[in-house]
Amino acid sequence: MISVRMLMMTGLLLGLPMGCASVSQEALDEAAKPVSKEFLLGPEDVLEVTVWRNQDLSRTVVVRPDGKISLPLIGDVQASGLNSSQVAAKIAARLTEFKENPNVSVSIKEVNSYFIYVLGEVLKPGKYPIKSYATVLQGVSLAGGFTIFASKNRMAVIRTHMSGDDTQHQIRIPVPYEDLVSGRGQVENFILKSGDTIVVP
């Protein structure tokens, strides 16, 4: 079921100007950014934290909505946006106050943080969890494809971008269907990032 928030978001995004104007350089740069080969953790991911020879500190934890995990002795540790090795290093550094040369490993038990939204004129609009990297066209396919009313060549991806000063703003990347299929447009069939929203007017 589609939430009221998602329906409101659809209305707002579909109301954005979607003419055939050239794509902004910011949008082109964002679409061309390579996706990290190493998985970065996010909220709702399930981690197995193992502290060698210390079963009391070893446990399964879930990354909270604020991006942190909680552990005995050291409290909250940032996990979102980091890979598992970086989180293990953070935990080990904090544990040095209580244990000499702690040996810490972090493994990923469940990936729940990678998801996309597909809204507008698709057969099954909604939020879709992704277990592996997906392109724009694969995202549309997950939502059952276009309806007969879809303006396929006015499709766009809305992405939240984090600026250098830690402020967020949204970037609209036009992704006309014919350009994606032909490969002759300004933007290719790029890999989606978690939280991306595909909008089909």
Image: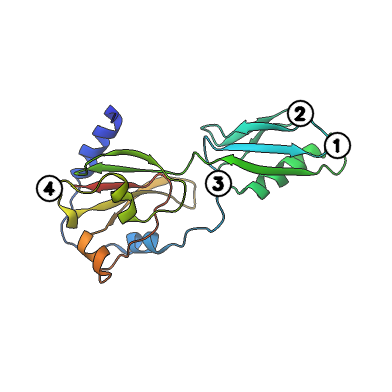
Q: Secondary structure at mark 3?
A: loop
The mark that comes first in sequence, 4 or 1, is: 1
Badge 4 crowding class, 10 Å Cα cut-off, few under 14, some 14 to 19, many 20 or more, is few
Q: Is 122 situated left or right of 31 in this image?
A: left
Front in this rendered view, residue 82 or 125? 125
Q: Give the mark nearer the N terminus: 4 vs 3.
A: 3
Residue at coordinates 21% horizontally, 41% vertically from top-left?
A: 123
Front one among 58 and 109: 109
CA separation, marks 4 and 2?
A: 58 Å
Q: Which mark is residue 157?
A: none
* Dot placed on the residue nearer the N-terminal end, 4 or 2: 2
Mark 4 and mark 1: Cα distance apart in space: 63 Å
Give residue 109's position: percent from left, percent from top. Answer: 60, 39
- What colour scheme governs how the chains and residues are painted in the rendered image of this protein? rainbow
Question: What mark, if any, has residue 99 been given in the picture?
Answer: 1
**Label 1 vs label 3: CA separation?**
27 Å
The residue under label 3 is: 81
* Residue 49, quarter of picture: top right
Q: Position of residue 84 (x, y in %)?
A: 64, 47
Tell me what residue is drawn at x 15 percent, y 49 percent.
150
- Looking at the rendered structure, the kind of residue marked 1 is Lys
- Residue 128: horizontal and vertical position, in percent? 37, 41
Residue at mark 4 to residue at mark 3: CA–CA distance? 39 Å
Provide the residue designation for mark 4: 148
- Secondary-structure class at tag 2: loop
- Which residue type does callout 2 highlight? Leu
Q: Which element type, helix, strand or loop, lies under badge 1?
A: loop
Amino acid marked by disc 4:
Ile
- On screen, residue 195 versus residue 144, left or right, reads right
Circle 4: element type: loop
